[in-house]
C-alpha cells in the first residue's frame, strides 16, 4: 500500500457517517482532536522504539502514519504537498536546510 492509497481510503472513510466510520467520528471532533490523537500515537511509537520490540514498533508506526494522514486531511494538506516539500529539501544538504529554517 502506498501513502497515496491510504490517503484515498481516509478520504472515503471521512465521507462516511460518524456512526459507521471511526475516521469520520474522529474528524467530526475537529482538527485539534485529530492532532491530539496523532500525538498520542507518536508517543506510543516512541515508547516502543525505546523498548526495542520491532513488531510492536511496526504496529505503532502504522498507527502514526495513519493518524498523520488523517491530520493532514483535517487541514486540507495532501500527501503530494508533503512529498513536494521533501523533494524540495533534497536539493540541499540536511545541515544547510536546517540552517535556512533558522532565518
Image (cartoon, rainbow, N blue to C red):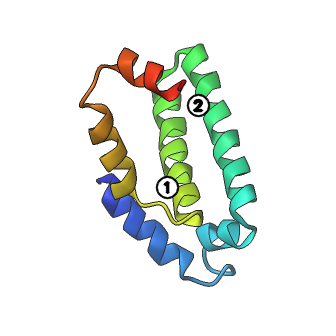
- Asked if residue 77 lies left or right of residue 80, the reply is right
User: Does dot 2 land on a helix, a strand or a loop?
Assistant: helix
* Residue nearest the viewer, comparing 20 with 94: 94
Q: Quadrant of the N terminus?
A: bottom left
Residue 59, position in %: x, y? 50, 38
Disc 2 + disc 1, Cβ < 8 Å: no
* Residue nearest the viewer, comparing 45 with 68: 68
Disc 2 versus disc 1: distance between alpha carbons? 16 Å
- Asked if residue 15 lies left or right of residue 26, the reply is left
In the rendered image, which residue does mark 2 sit on?
45
User: Does dot 1 land on a helix, a strand or a loop?
Assistant: helix
Mark whose residue sits in front, 2 or 1: 1
- In the image, residue 94 above or below residue 2: above
Dot 2 or dot 1, earlier in sequence: 2
In the displayed image of the protein, which residue is found farthest to the front? Answer: 103
> In which quadrant of the rendered view does residue 60 lie?
top right
Residue shown at 53%/26% (left/top)?
103
Q: Badge 1 local density, few (<14 within 10 Å), some, or many (20+)?
A: many
Residue 26, position in %: x, y? 68, 65
Residue shown at 32%/33% (left/top)?
89
- In the image, residue 49 above or below residue 73: above
Residue shown at 54%/24% (left/top)?
102
- In the image, residue 87 above or below residue 54: below
In the rendered image, which residue does mark 1 sit on?
69
Residue shown at 68%/51% (left/top)?
35
> In which quadrant of the rendered view does residue 5 lie?
bottom left
Residue 4, position in %: x, y? 32, 59
* Residue nearest the viewer, comparing 57 with 25: 25
* Residue nearest the viewer, comparing 11 with 77: 77
Amino acid at each position: 500500500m502506498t501513502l497515496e492509497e491510504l490517503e484515498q481510503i481516509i478520504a472515503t472513510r471521512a465521507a462516511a457517517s460518524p456512526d459507521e466510520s471511526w475516521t469520520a467520528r474522529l474528524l467530526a471532533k475537529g482538527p485539534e482532536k485529530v492532532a491530539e490523537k496523532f500525538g498520542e500515537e507518536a508517543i506510543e511509537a516512541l515508547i516502543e522504539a525505546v523498548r526495542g520490540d520491532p513488531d510492536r514498533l511496526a504496529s505503532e508506526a502504522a498507527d502514526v502514519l495513519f493518524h498523520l494522514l488523517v491530520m493532514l486531511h483535517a487541514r486540507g494538506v495532501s500527501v503530494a504537498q508533503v512529498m513536494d516539500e521533501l523533494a524540495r529539501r533534497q536539493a540541499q544538504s540536511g545541515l544547510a536546510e536546517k540552517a535556512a529554517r533558522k532565518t
